[in-house]
Image (tube, rainbow, N blue to C red):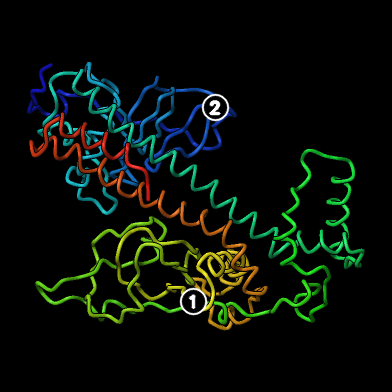
Amino acid sequence: MSSDWLEIQLGNFLELKRGYDLPIKKREEGGVEVISSSGVSGFHCEAKVKGPGVITGRYGTIGKVFYSKRDFWPLNTTLYVKDFKGNHPEFVYYFLKTLDFLQYSDKAAVPGVNRNHLHTAWVKVPSNVAVQERIAKFLSALDRKITLNTQINQTLEQMAQALFKSWFVDFDPVIDNALDAGNPIPEPLAEHAARRKAMWAAGNESAPARLPAETRRLFPDRFEEDEVLGWVPAGWTIKPLDQVARYQNGLALQKFRPNEGEEFLPVLKIAQLRARKTDGVEKASVNIKPECIVHNGDVVFSWSGTLMIDMWSGGKAALNQHLFKVTSDQYPKWFYFLWTQRHLELFQRIAADKAVTMGHIKRQHLAEAFCLVPEEQLISKAGESIRPLIEKMLSSRLESEELTQLRDTLLPKLLSGELKLPEAEAAVDTALETEPA
């Protein structure tokens, strides 16, 4: 099978066409995706283009490329491939992702991609459609694995949150113990307790599973009333978040830029936390204080702008201001991660109420957010179930980061001749066979 690569103008490889106007008020209910420069932006009852299709931004978000297997409606802020000219559609999708569309944009106040200019670009592509299909096949295999990892991670996080909520927020094992012991159930918890009791009495298959007796013995069998939190498990300690974990604020890193030729760290800001990767545009000196350097697995909490908490998986980086690195010498990571996450909605409401452009919380709000802390033995027992879920989630995410990097570098290396097709296929096979740590 020939794997010759052909240098050709893009307009001779495919034909791009501007999308079509479709105001929201004219859209009718249906299952056809309406695709804008930033992706799917709604649905309509009618398709304008038959799938499979490839779409990219003309105005607005420039540089993103989308693939649709089904018929779709491309908006007028996009360019779509009107004619693939016999080339493999999925390869075209991956190929267009390698182009720097900003090189072909107008020099206007609001830049937009000039289709005619783009058509004149000289590109290098496989002349054999079967080779295009082989390349698309192994790149899409990486994408499927990344998507699967994302779905698995969502399930793992939901499982960890559900178990945490059951034990430390809803107090299900304490309620069960109190019912067995004949101890009173506080009125705010009575309805929940009655539902659990009724499901067991009816032999309902969906009834919550009872914990093993050995584990249940670690929970109290009665409640006591706290003046702040109301009814809580007897004997559990109430602590504010800032006593459960340490919240280290980042630095104003524009003051700590590296000198010419000096080793540097990429900067982690709110946008990078949201994207789960640094962009390498901003750099900081490696000589900043160690507590403001983050590594894979560190818990990072943005307290300003977009409030969110996540476990970082984008590699060693310098922590910018408006972000906390969350650590604890006393409690395990899963414990302070899930407690901080538990209070996130409250913090978001506080930030939204700020009469400023960029809502935020203050340290006093950490001191006013309370956690219930059981005995160390129970925390250790809970960790046996929750910690593996969190660790698996992180390792799966790190694997996806590696697969994404591999996917994004394979085609450019093939285009440049740095890598041969069999070598690329072997690299993908190796990556997909390797289980995450």
Q: Nearer the viewer, residue 328 or 248?
A: 328
Percent from the top left, x then y, of residue 391?
Answer: 46, 56
Give the left or right position of residue 335, taking residue 233 as reference.
Answer: left
Give the left or right position of residue 219, taking residue 271 as reference.
Answer: right
Give the left or right position of residue 33, taking residue 341 as reference.
Answer: left
In the rendered view, tell whether residue 19 sits above or below residue 222.
above
In the image, what residue occupies the spot 77% across and 71% down?
Answer: 233
Give the left or right position of residue 97, taking residue 77 as reference.
Answer: left
Looking at the image, which residue sits at the far front?
214
User: Dot 2 corresponds to which residue?
Assistant: 31
Question: Which element is circle 1 on?
Answer: loop
Question: Which element is circle 2 on?
Answer: loop
What amino acid does circle 2 point to? Gly
Count of numbered labels shown in the rendering? 2
Q: Mark on residue 328?
A: 1
In the image, what residue occupies the spot 62% across and 63% down?
Answer: 381
Percent from the top left, x then y, of residue 54?
Answer: 32, 29
Percent from the top left, x then y, of residue 270?
Answer: 40, 65
Quote the CA–CA distance across marks 2 and 1: 48 Å
Instruction: Between label 2 and label 1, give the one nearer the viewer.
Output: 1
Density class for disc 2 (Cα within 10 Å; few <14, some 14-19, many ≥20) is some
| Quadrant showing the N terminus | top left
In the image, what residue occupies the spot 81% across and 58% down?
Answer: 176
Label 2 or label 1, whichever comes before in sequence order: 2
In the rendered view, tell whether residue 46 sits above or below residue 144.
above
Density class for disc 1 (Cα within 10 Å; few <14, some 14-19, many ≥20) is some
In the image, what residue occupies the spot 18% across and 75% down?
Answer: 258
Q: Mark on residue 407?
A: none
For residue 138, what is the image quadrant?
top left
Percent from the top left, x then y, of residue 6?
Answer: 8, 25
